[in-house]
Image (cartoon, coloured by chain):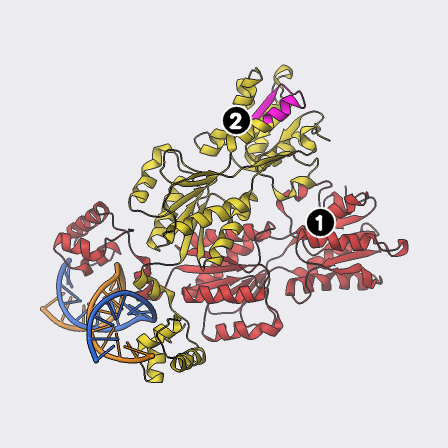
Chain colours: A yellow, B red, C blue, D orange
Amino acid sequence: LKNRITIRHIAKELGISAMTVSRALNNRANVDKKTKKKILETAKMMGYKPNHVARSLTINKTYTIGVVIPKLTNSFFPDAIQGIEEVAFENDFQIILTHSSENADREKQVIEALVSKRVDGILISTVLTKKELSFYTDLLDTNYPLVFFDRWLPGLEVNNVRTNDKEIARKIVDHLIDDHKYRKIAYIAGPDKLSISHERKEGYISSMKEHNLEIDDDWIVSANFDEEAGYEATKKLLSLPENKMPRAIFTVNDSAAFGAMEAIFDANLKIPDDIALVGFTDDKQDKLLNPPLTTVHQPAFEMGKRASQILIDIINGKSTTIEDIKIKSNIVLRRSCGCK
Amino acid sequence: LKNRITIRHIAKELGISAMTVSRALNNRANVDKKTKKKILETAKMMGYKPNHVARSLTINKTYTIGVVIPKLTNSFFPDAIQGIEEVAFENDFQIILTHSSENADREKQVIEALVSKRVDGILISTVLTKKELSFYTDLLDTNYPLVFFDRWLPGLEVNNVRTNDKEIARKIVDHLIDDHKYRKIAYIAGPDKLSISHERKEGYISSMKEHNLEIDDDWIVSANFDEEAGYEATKKLLSLPENKMPRAIFTVNDSAAFGAMEAIFDANLKIPDDIALVGFTDDKQDKLLNPPLTTVHQPAFEMGKRASQILIDIINGKSTTIEDIKIKSNIVLRRSCGCK
DNA sequence: TTGTATGCGTTATCAT
DNA sequence: ATGATAACGCATACAA
């Protein structure tokens, strides 16, 4: 089955050498116009499909980049991937998409697979932590082109494309305090060993401290990046005694905020009247929610494009510097925080 | 740069033949335990990474499947892809993800690229139409393993994994008529040349006809699958004269419904009091919308898994039959239709 | 159990 | 402008 026509078949058919066929097919300058025309015609006629596997073996380049993400659930990653693929497509690259399922071992496993497939470079939104730094330092030692996006790993000499997590988190908490006068603010956190979770938490903490607001230990609830965890975390918060009950909740991402919303509704409370809620991501439907969700807008598409471009530049030898790029997020005020 | 260690290097290092190394690395039975152990150790020590490009060239198999989707915007495709990748991962396959951007020429282009990369098979949610049938019949003639999911192409002798678009569309319109007594129902349609759009429209029409309800020409508004088009289409509907004004709107998918929602709110109308709205997809946040959106739940994850499994079975020679599989969707009643 | 020769389809290199 | 040869890294087929 499959395609059996090779450049040799075309060559034989025309009584010329395979090399000439190769040259013609690759638009090299040094081939007679007439023969080139013939070659292209018979190639089409015979149903020739170039074999990029063989090509990759000889030129030592696959025109493929690997992408590793935790999950495809919230809208950040789909948008980022669209950006990644857009740039890849323009540069005649394809992408192999893999996901780690928030699992460190699986992440290592898919990276190994990508390396074996000899992708020209890898874009990673990692779930690995400091303990596992050596996995990537080893890879970097072999000069493998790597770019981290969104979830980076501190301590790595590598290109990052991320956002200003800490500052923007601080800003949105500032807004809750300064503009709405809330003082009891809880934070539903992601795993603290992950850089983005940690940074966002730091932003929350620094805002509270700057306003001389005490943070009750019960206000920082560890959760995950998903809806279920957000739901459970919020139930915990809502079961706190009256005097500890938060007046507002900030969540590590929108998925957690969705879970929080459900929990708040289930408790027959109103947003923002009884409790305000702000998220992080700016999922597409946020503005249609009840109430519309105030959140941090992450430029997912742009981050994807940027990361992709940097990686391809590295692959093409057009970039040698190592940068830690922050693409700024901004706050989107809607009704869930009490605005309007 | 990159990895330069091959099985030959390992062989030389150990003073044995490359073939023995190959056998050991592939867990073949006929290799001495001691030498195998040595080989595995030195392979690891030398940082050997198997080269699947070379492997693919010899065994004529890439353990890669191509996936072609229109876009990654709504939540159907991300979910479906998670299903696809889940099954692929279990079977040691990776996926190359490409998108056509709802553009037929680009779809052809990415398929060509996938074929050149010699993916073992392709999963397609096509935007091609009948006119372009030959593109796929040609591909099928070369015995290329192909499975269509969600958006199939009528007239093709190929495996489809889709949903019962027409019946379920009819059912949800039945619900609007039977349970809510709406009689003026509009339909925001996708491109009619695409199978799913056509089928869903047929479902709408057949329900209306069965109930002896006349369909005003102005009630079927052509749009697209996206939010903007849904918004524009709805604005058209809302500008109809009083006697023609629809009492309910059914949209080809949830994205269009989101646009419709915005348009309705912009017109200061209430859902479902002034106008009811139902969608198709069951996007994750539908239940949190204001009001929660009644819609058709498509089992995206299951469809992805099923399609992926079928393709891999074909690739592995475990399946030879051609099936047109419909995975049933079901209706999710929420408040936007008037329920509760 | 191990080794040798050969080929997968393409391109680089050197030749003509 | 065109061709012959070798090489990319691995696995198949056969031999020892």
Relative to B96, say whether A197 is above or below: above
Do the CB atoms of the residues marked 2 and 1 lie less than 8 Å apart? no
- Residue C12 % position (x, y): 28, 65
Relative to B332, say whether B132 is above or below: below
Callout 1, which amino acid? Gly
**In screen coordinates, is A42 left or right of B57?**
right
Between residue A106 and residue B303, name the one nearer to us. A106
Quadrant (top left, top right, bottom left, bottom right) of the C terminus of chain A: top right
Callout 1: chain:
B
Bin the neighbour count of mark 1 within 10 Å (Cα to Cα): few under 14, some 14-19, many 20 and up.
Answer: many
Which image quarter: residue B134? bottom right
Which image quarter: residue A105? top left
Residue reaching furthest right? B243
Instruction: Name the residue: 37% across, 52% down.
Output: A315
Bin the neighbour count of mark 2 within 10 Å (Cα to Cα): few under 14, some 14-19, many 20 and up.
Answer: many
Residue at disc 1, secondary structure: helix
Residue carrying label 2:
A203
Residue at disc 2, secondary structure: helix
Q: Which residues are magenta?
A: A173-189
**In screen coordinates, is B314 left or right of B249?**
left
Q: Which mark is residue B259?
A: 1
Q: CA distance from mark 2 to mark 1?
A: 34 Å
Between residue B266 and residue A238, name the one nearer to us. B266
Callout 2, which amino acid? Gly
**In screen coordinates, is A334 left or right of B150?**
right
Callout 2: chain:
A
